[in-house]
Image (spheres, rainbow, N blue to C red):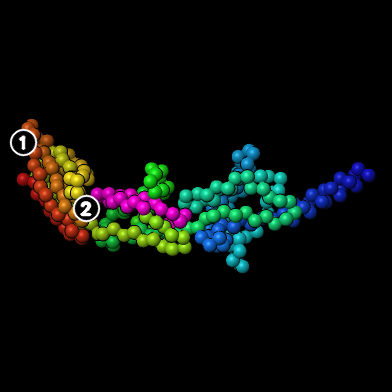
Amino acid sequence: DENTFKNVLGVVISQALDNTTAQINLLDITGKPTETNVPIILYDHTSGKVKDAFVHTLNYKGQPDTLVLDPLIVYDMEIHTVPPVRVDSVVIFSGTHTHIGANTPQGDLELRASPRISQSITCVVKPSGREEILHVQDFGTTQRYLSGTYDLEILTLPRIIQKGVHIKASAKTTIAVPPPGRVTIQTGVSGFGSIFVQREQGYEWVVDLSNSSERKVFQLQPGQYKVIFRSKFAQETGYSKSEEFRVSPGSSTIVKIK
C-alpha cells in the first residue's frame, strides 16, 4: 500500500544518504594527494550560501579524511591556498564514495632577515607580471604558496624589487636581505629635503626628511646615497645643500649638512 511504499522509500533514501561519502584530494606536483592543512569552504552552487568550512586533513593512514556530503547539493569549492584554487559544480554521487580532486602543488617561501635589523620588514608578494597583491609577508616567517613565479617588493629603505622568483613545489625558496646601515642626518636646523640612492640611470628618491626635526635616523640598505636639504628659513634656492655618503652592511654613518 501507499504507506508501505513511503516507508520503504524513506529507508532507501536514508541508506543512500548514509552511504554517501567523499574525499578531497589536494594533488602535489606528482599528482598524489599529499597536500593538506589548508582551509576549504564549500558553497551551494545554486544559492551561493556556505554549506561547510573546515581545514583539510589527512587521516592516520596518510589519506584525505572522509567527508559526509549531501548528494542533493551541487557544490562550489574554494581551497584557500595562496593564491586560492576554486573548483565549481562539484557533484556528489549518491550511495558511493566520491573523489574530488584539485591541483594544489605548494612550496615554501622563507624570508630571512639579519638579526642586526632593529625594525620589522615586510614583503609584498604578487603574481609575476601583475599588480594584484596576493599576500604581505613579514621577514622572519615562512609561507606556503602554489608553485609558480612571483614578484617580490621588499619594503626596506630603499625598496628591493625581485622579479621572477620561482617557488618550486615541495621545496623551500629562501630570500635574504643584507643588514642595513644606520644613518644619522644632522642638519642643524629644521627644513626640507630628501635622501636619494644612486642607480645606473641616476638618482632614485628613497625618503623625505622630516621638516620638524634637526636630527633624523634611518636604516638604509647598502649603497651610494645623496641627501639634498634646504633650511626652512632660507628664502633662496641657492641655500640648498647636498652631501653624498656611502652605506655598508651593518655600518653606522653620521652625515652633517653644514
Answer with left or right where residue 154 lies relative to residue 38.
left
Magenta-drawn stretch, dominant element (helix, strand or loop): strand
* Mark 1 nearby-residue class (10 Å; few <14, some 14–19, many ≥20): few
Q: Is 158 colored magenta in this rendering?
A: yes
* Residue lying at 39% horizontally and 44% vertically, measured from the top left: 130
Three-letter amino acid code at the position of disc 1: Gly
* Residue lying at 39% horizontally and 56% vertically, measured from the top left: 166
Mark 1 or 2, nearer chain start: 2
Image mark for residue 220: 2
Three-letter amino acid code at the position of disc 2: Leu
Q: Is residue 254 visible?
A: yes
* Residue lying at 26% horizontally and 59% vertically, measured from the top left: 178
Q: Is 103 colored magenta in this rendering?
A: no
* Residue lying at 84% horizontally and 48% vertically, measured from the top left: 9
Instruction: Determine the secondary structure under disc 1.
Output: helix
108 vs 219, nearest the viewer: 108
Which region is colored magenta?
143-164
Quadrant the C terminus occupies: top left
63 is higher (above) or lower (below) than 208:
below
184 vs 173, nearest the viewer: 173
The extreme bottom residue here reads 61
**How far is disc 1 from disc 2 in space, using C-alphas?**
28 Å
User: Residue 97's quadrant in the figure?
Assistant: bottom right
Residue 164 in picture, x, y percent from top left: 36, 53
Q: Is residue 182 visible?
A: no
Q: Which residue is mark 1?
A: 238
The extreme right residue here reads 1
